[in-house]
Image (tube, helix red, strand yellow):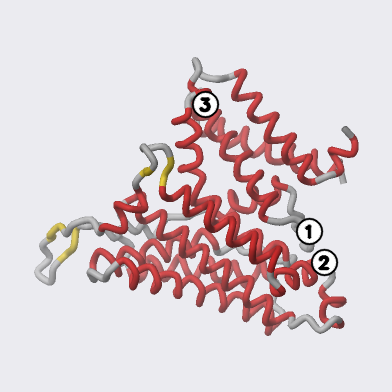
Amino acid sequence: MRSLLRNPVGRAVLSLVLVCLVGVVFNADGTFFRWDTHRDMLRLVSVYGILAAASTIVIITGGIDLSVGSLLGLSAVCFSIFSIHRGWGAIPSVLATLCIGAVCGSISGGVIGRFKIQPFIATLAMMVFARGFAKYISAGQKISTAVQSTDGTFSYVPVPGIFDFIGTRIWGDNIAVVTILMIVVLFAAWVFLSQTVPGRELYAIGGNEEAARFSGVPIPKNIIIAYAISGLLCAAAGIAQAAQELQGDPEAGASYELSAIAMVVIGGTSLRGGTGGIHLTVLGILIIGYLEKILSINAVGEETRLMLTGAIILAAVLFQKKGD
């Protein structure tokens, strides 16, 4: 048992098992044992999971990205404007939105890597700017299929096909497309971190930046890459959010960064950087997802759910720290 607790994977798996056991005991008259409960949990956690993948890449470097929620909101608004109001096709809308996310992430990475600004400060500034810009280009309104003409009247346009596709379920109504998107993102992030040179260099930067610099690792370049990928994934999450809500809400993603970071940390990736990975984040996503779902099916009030979730997050982190 002691050797299990010393292993981040073992600690995360044990935490997940304990959460699932709570679901078995408090199963809400068998609701926990139905497939649709697990399917819906995966769908609800998918957007957060994509943001958690983005946060993992940044946290590996020893940094942090507070702007992921705001970038999601900005991306949701931009994607809705492109696809609904301007009538762009699916591919141009997706590519343009992904580029906006990557550019915003690159700006944060450039400020951190080139000018040595603390990640907390740089991404806090981007968080505020992105949220403000989302409200500016949307005039503070949700971007929906109700389009206002120059004379002030409203007309309704059809929901773009890409919205219907992302928001649907496939394979006999058994899994949501947005869940598949999360799985693809998590797999791609795992490949990047574990199988590519830049990914391994991010671990070196997070482990010991000075040693990485003396070893010839291009620090600023890799920091920019990390935050650019984070912004790209935030844009993907924003697209998924807009498709599920059938609108671009400038307030979307508020406080999502806290959930994303919690998933990463609970999984076992250290905020100090240099250790962890996507495989641990997957466990963190499942822990938070099942915790929220178990509380939901047992009709626990939102205020109680928030308090319990906060307490369990703290307990899980202390539990993992004790095993170090």
Q: Which residue is nearer to you in this view: 218 or 168?
A: 168
Q: Are marks 1 and 2 in contact (CB under 8 Å)?
A: yes
Query: Which of 160 and 116 lies nearest the eye of the viewer?
Result: 160
- Indicate the quadrant where residue 105 lies: bottom right
- 3D distance between C-alphas at marks 3 and 1: 35 Å
Q: Position of residue 322 (x, y in %)?
A: 86, 41
**In this rendering, position of residue 294 left or right of residue 57:** left
| Foreground of the two, 47 or 117 | 47
Q: Secondary structure at mark 3?
A: loop
Badge 3 crowding class, 10 Å Cα cut-off, few under 14, some 14 to 19, many 20 or more, is some
Q: Secondary structure at mark 1?
A: loop
What amino acid type should be assigned to the residue bearing mark 3? Val
Q: Which residue type carries mark 2?
A: Gly
In this picture, is 202 found above or below 219? Answer: above
Identify residue for label 3.
300
Residue at the (78%, 80%) spot, across then down: 217
- Between 29 and 177, the one lying in front of the other is 177
Q: Look at 74% across and 49% down and name the residue there.
A: 268
Which of the labelled discs sits on residue 67, or is there none?
A: none
Q: Which mark is residue 275?
A: 1
Nearer-N-terminus badge (3/2): 2
Please rate how many residues cluster around mark 2, counting C-alpha atoms within 10 Å: few if below 14, some from 14 to 19, many from 20.
Answer: some
Q: Badges 3 and 2: C-beta atoms under 8 Å apart?
A: no
- Alpha carbons under labels 3 and 2: distance apart: 41 Å
The Cα–Cα distance between marks 1 and 2, rounded to whole angstroms, is 7 Å
Residue at position x 47%, y 50% from top?
A: 180
Q: Which mark is residue 207?
A: 2
Give the quadrant of residue 142: bottom left
How crowded pointer 1 is (Cα within 10 Å; few <14, some 14-19, many 20+) is rated as some
In primary-sequence order, the first of circles 3 and 1 is 1
Where is residue 143? Give x, y as percent.
Answer: 29, 60
**Circle 3 or circle 2, nearest the eye:** 2
